[in-house]
Amino acid sequence: MEIQAYATLVIPFIIVVYLAVLLFMRPARIVLLASLLGGLTMGIINMLVDLIAYFAHWWHYTLNGLILHLPLPFYITPILIYGSIVYLLIWRFWHGRGHWFALLLLFGIPLFRAATDIIGASVTQSSYTSFDSILAGPLDVVMWLLMFYGGFFVFTRLAPLEIRLKKEAS
């Protein structure tokens, strides 16, 4: 039931927020596609690591309605929010006075998300994730670093950060 409620109530909100960000940011088509592919890379890596973690007994999800032991609708958040929107913000603020913000996002997002996963699963027990191994915390940090920078690698290969300077110069 939790997954259906998430899909019904949260996913439309995420999509509206994503479209609002696109409306105000107005990225070039190549940058938009690159950010979506970077976010998709992030989501696929997240799914693969979660599946490996389930079968290796590192962590598992405690939800009803899992598909292949995974909460598939939950992956829209890393794809659109922590992937595509963050990559677009890094691209937007990379040059100029906002460079510090781009660096903050670049280094802060994976560490912030890993910390919230660990605190939610281990300390407060308020997460849908249950850590089964002492390796779960360090592996979660590695997963977020691999996911975020893997997606960022795809993003920067398809839409280099210098593309904005070329667009503004012309």
Image: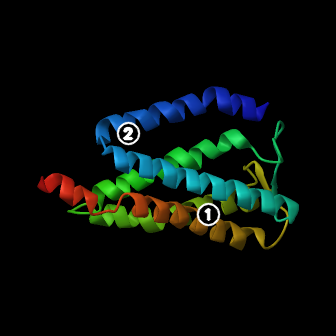
- Residue 95 falls in which quadrant of the image? bottom left
1 vs 2, front mark? 2
Q: Is residue 95 depicted above or below 67 in this figure? A: below
The residue type indicated by label 2 comes to Val
Q: Position of residue 13 (x, y in %)?
A: 53, 31
Q: Is residue 10 depicted above or below 29 in this figure? A: above
Q: Nearer the viewer, residue 120 or 143?
A: 143
Q: Quadrant of the N terminus?
A: top right
Q: Gap in Å between the C-alphas at discs 1 and 2? A: 24 Å
- Residue 99 falls in which quadrant of the image? bottom left
Q: Are marks 1 and 2 in contact (CB under 8 Å)?
A: no
Whether residue 82 is visible to the viewer of this picture, yes or no, is no
Q: Farthest left residue?
A: 170
- Residue 98 falls in which quadrant of the image? bottom left
Whether residue 162 is visible to the viewer of this picture, yes or no, is yes
Crowding at mark 2 (Cα within 10 Å: few <14, some 14-19, many 20+): some
Q: Secondary structure at mark 2?
A: helix
Q: Position of residue 112 (x, y in %)?
A: 54, 62
Task: Quickly name the residue at label 2.
Answer: 21
Q: Nearer the viewer, residue 29 or 45?
A: 29
Q: Is residue 73 depicted above or below 43 in this figure? A: above
Q: Farthest top residue?
A: 8
Q: Position of residue 125 (x, y in %)?
A: 76, 54
Task: Quickly name the residue at label 1.
Answer: 114
Residue 168 as seen in the image, left or right of residue 58: left
The residue type indicated by label 1 comes to Ala
Q: Residue at the location (59% across, 62% down)? A: 147
Q: Residue at the location (24% across, 56% down)? A: 164
